[in-house]
């Protein structure tokens, strides 16, 4: 009976030591959550992609916005897009990217 208990203890020690070793091993960070938007999240990779798009659009224009303002604008764009998408889903609206671009062009012509 004592042999079985001793074997169990040794077995548990081996399992816990290997679990401890695995927990201490290095890990790779895949992505980071920047903001929560209702049922979705904005990730660091999404923010970097949006920043790249904005920086590319501003590359040819002389703009006085600093890096922090541009990052804030990119985050606001992502949050707005996710809120609009979530609201559209709740209303049962299903559109393609082409339809959205077409409507945005019309909207921008009305404003300008």
Image (spheres, helix red, strand yellow):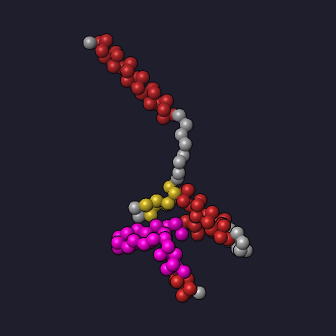
- Residue 86 position, x and y percent, is 40, 68
Q: Quadrant of residue 70?
A: bottom right
Task: Name which residue lies at 54% across and 46% down.
Answer: 29
- Which residue is painted at 53% across and 51% down in the image? 31
Q: Is residue 4 visible?
A: yes
**Image quarter in which the N terminus is found:** top left
Camera-nearest residue between 87 and 38: 87
| Dominant secondary-structure state across the stretch colored magenta | helix
Residue 102: % across, % down: 51, 78
Q: Residue at x 59, y 59 (%)?
A: 48
Which residue reaches farthest left?
Answer: 1
Side of 106 where 5 appears, left or right: left
Q: Which span is picked out in magenta?
A: 77-105
For the C terminus, the quadrant is: bottom right
Quadrant of the image occupied by residue 59? bottom right
Is 70 positioned to the left or the right of 60 in the image? left
On screen, residue 49 above or below 77: above
Which residue is at 53% across, 48% downward?
30
Occupied quadrant, residue 3: top left
Question: Does residue 83 show up magenta in the picture?
Answer: yes
């Amino acid at each position: 009976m004592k042999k079985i208990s001793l074997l169990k203890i040794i077995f548990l020690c081996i399992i816990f030591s290997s679990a401890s070793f695995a927990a201490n091993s290095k890990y790779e960070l895949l992505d980071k959550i920047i903001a929560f938007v209702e049922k979705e999240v904005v990730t660091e990779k999404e923010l970097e992609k949006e920043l790249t798009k904005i920086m590319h659009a501003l590359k040819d224009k002389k703009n006085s916005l600093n890096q922090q303002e541009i990052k804030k604008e990119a985050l606001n764009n992502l949050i707005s897009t996710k809120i609009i998408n979530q609201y559209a889903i709740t209303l049962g609206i299903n559109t393609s990217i082409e339809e959205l671009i077409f409507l945005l062009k019309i909207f921008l012509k009305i404003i300008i």
